[in-house]
Image: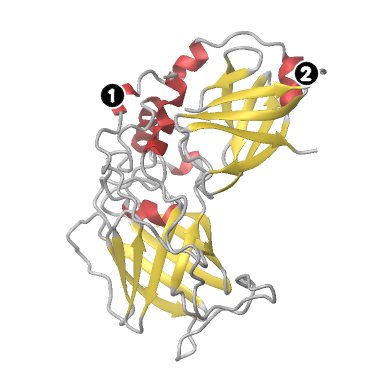
Amino acid sequence: MNRTAMAAAVWLFPVSLCAQWLNFPTPGIPRTADGKPNLHAPAQRTADGKPDFTGLWAFPIDSAVGNIAVRNAGDLKPADVQPWAQALVRQRAESFSKDNPRYRCLPEGPGYSAGTGGMKRFIQTPTMIVILNEDLTYRQIFMDARALETNPNPSWMGYAVGHFDGDTLVVESSGFNDRTWLLDGYPHTEALRMTERYRRTDFGHLEITVTFQDPEAYSKAWTVPVRAQLAADTEMLESVCNENGDSGQEHWVGKPSDDEKSAVKVAPEIMAKYVGVYKGPYIQGPRTVEVSFSGGALFISVNGGPKQRVFPQSETNFSGTGLTYRFIRDEHGIGTHIIEGHVSGDYKYERQK
């Protein structure tokens, strides 16, 4: 197994690509003339006029899931990260993030809110909102005007209270233990405070902002945008990552920096012909891979995430992010497709004209 693909072994864990009752239409939702769910219809409301978030929501897989590099971390700047946290991010990247709670089948805590992908079922009542996750974890958001505990017992999922600010649901959470990650590689302490703002812009779409505040790890609060779409005419399947036993982590060998050491020389004019935007299907949704060339080096950005340098292992094969990238060229050497290599298989994306 290629060392550069080891971090992608997360996809060996169960992923609910589809669900049961596929032919049972979700009752009570607006539909177009051809019977399809009308996701752009007005958002539903509760009896007291508040936005109703009840439903099954599909959260897109984050731009760099399966990638050892740090995900798109919103407006976080390197200077905002405390030195000890920066060092830990680098250390985790060099080990393919093998200690990520997700890979160890542990709850992801605040990470669930920052775009881990998959489906979540929201159940809303006047006094509580419950969020059910595919891995059998859950959150309780108390809507009965109680205050957050000032000194809670640290837990995986934390404690949450919510209220409405107009049509926006505001959720404040604290009491997380320090064993979870905010995003791939980013740590936090027990001082973490998380604020989420949910807006149901129409019947089928959620816009969410997640703000992390942890003065022991970051010099200021930082915010990550997240979007979700109503999953109509389907149901959620449980996805328990350790039900298949061995995760194969003993095979996660090598380091990302090894790819730089094994790099070969490729003429800049050859690499420049790979620059472009490549798109195609990937797991639960579309994927965009943007290739850029700067300073004699090739960079990859996935779904708008940060640019990550990749190192040539041949004229057409590159690695260095935890995944592999192979270019298919035309007779002029111009890239027409890019093949992204994961342990779960290869994914082919076509260059956009």
Q: Residue furthest front?
A: 23
The colour scheme used here is secondary structure
Q: Position of residue 31 (x, y in %)?
A: 62, 76
In the drawing, does residue 331 fall left or right of residue 219?
right
Question: Residue under circle 2?
Answer: 333
Decide if residue 332 is on the left or right side of residue 198. right
- Residue 85: percent from left, percent from top: 36, 38
Q: Nearer the viewer, residue 216 or 248?
A: 248
- Taking the spot 54% from the left edge, 78% from the top edge, the residue there is 29
CA gap, disc 2 to disc 1? 39 Å
Mark 2 is surrounded, within 10 Å at the Cα level, by few (under 14), some (14 to 19) or many (20 or more) other residues, namely some
Q: Earlier in the sequence, mark 2 or mark 1?
A: 1
Q: Nearer the viewer, residue 191 or 249?
A: 249
Q: Amino acid at mark 1?
A: Glu
Q: Is residue 213 visible?
A: no
Whether residue 197 is visible here, answered yes or no, is: yes
Q: Secondary structure at mark 1?
A: helix
- Confirm or deny contact between disc 2 and disc 1 (CB under 8 A): no
Q: Which mark is residue 317?
A: none
**For residue 320, above or below residue 215:** above
Question: Which residue position is annotated with label 1?
Answer: 250
Task: Name the spot of residue 155 as percent of width and height, x first.
Answer: 21, 56
Question: x%, y% of residue 171?
Answer: 39, 69
Residue 107, relative to residue 96: is it above or below? below
- Judge whether 256 appears above or below 220 on screen: above
Amino acid bearing label 2: Gly
Q: Residue furthest bottom?
A: 48
For this rendering, which residue is in front, 188 or 81?
A: 188
Q: Is residue 239 above or below residue 27?
A: above
Q: Quadrant of the N terminus?
A: top left
As drawn, is 185 to the left or to the right of 262?
A: left
